[in-house]
Image: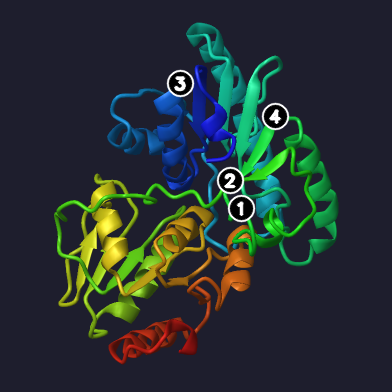
Amino acid sequence: MKVIGDISGRKVLVSPLDWGLGHAARSVPVMRILCAQNDVVILCGPSAYGFLRRELPDVEIIKIDDWRIRYPKHKINFFTILGWIPVMLRNSIHEHRFAKRLIKEWGINCVVSDNRYGLLFKRLECYIITHQVCPKMPKGFGFMEDLGGWMFKKYLSRFDKVLIPDFEDGDSLSGSLAGDRSLPKDKFVRIGILSRFCGSQAGTPSLQVSSILVLMSGQENQRTILENKLIAALDGCGREVLFVRGVGESRPILEDTDNIKFVNMLSGNDLYLALQSASLIICRAGYSTLCDVVALGKQAVIIPTPGQTEQEYLAERLDGRFGFRSLGQEDGNLAESIKKICTALKKNVLLHSV
């Protein structure tokens, strides 16, 4: 892996953003490469802590409390994002101060972070993993994208390297978020698709695999809204469905239906096997999930979180490409579209032709 494979003999602090499990999950292959050649300490939030303990049981992992971004019940808009800015700034200051103490205590001389913009330190090698060099603005505020992209790129340039998890050559998955704009190649480096399932070895599944795999993720209340819509669309669809809700084990497990098996979470091995065996995956348009789907060569229906500009852009861009079909959560025909796709699967019709 570019850049990461060149880091050796260091005391490295690795820290993924705690915004769902996506950043932690995609950082696993990076962490494994670093652990093979360095002394590694991981800093993560409470959501990722248990996951990383299972994936990397022999690595020192320290938990940091983050102030969570709260999603509204209504659709995210520009003013919602404005309200997030003070929380994100406070998080950056908090993580910087917390990590600074760890750096002194553990003798850290290299920092690799995933979307933690506060982990930039003078006189240390600092790398950041991100696919958002030029963030998307909500509809009606596109005129601010050039200015916002310039400011973002200028700040990211202060890191030693900006590592973009995207194809090294050819068509990009991230599009204009990072791949379609002219970036200094000595500073902004495509390191290839990041997925913890690359090179995975199949084990013995602890549950029966199904032809349709639903992967729920993201913040409430939008997670539950989509969950309810998908259950209504898939119940009795004539296909076996494994429905991974993406919630903690403390949450009650939903009662199975005739064709839907519900689980709150899956182990890494079970999730890998479920992804490999599924004829169709239904998921959010989160970038880490998209990378997993592409890495395994699967086809998927992607449903972006309403108002989350990055997911909406990716869903629109990837519709009909890389094996993806995009549907809208707020589309009144969502259930009908899902049922048509299920019928097409019975006839072995390609997803893009539905």
Residue type marked 2: Ile
Q: Is residue 109 above or below residue 59?
A: above
Circle 3 is placed at which residue position?
Answer: 38
Alpha carbon separation for disc pair 1 and 2: 6 Å
Q: Residue 160 carries which label?
A: 4
Q: Quadrant location of residue 226?
A: bottom left
Alpha carbon separation for disc pair 4 and 2: 15 Å
Residue visible at 78% across and 48% down? 183
Determine whether, in the image, residue 106 is placed left or right of residue 262.
Answer: right
Where does the image place residue 62, in percent across and percent down from the top left?
41, 22
User: Could you tell me if the residues under marks 3 and 2 are in contact, i.e. CB atoms within 8 Å?
Assistant: no
Alpha carbon separation for disc pair 3 and 4: 18 Å
Residue type marked 4: Asp
User: Could you tell me if the residues under marks 1 and 4 are in contact, i.e. CB atoms within 8 Å?
Assistant: no
Q: Does residue 221 appear in this view?
A: no
Label 4 element class: loop
Where does the image place residue 282, in percent across and percent down from the top left?
39, 70
Q: Nearer the viewer, residue 274 or 51?
A: 274
Closer to the chain start, of discs 4 and 2, is 4
Circle 1 is placed at which residue position?
Answer: 168
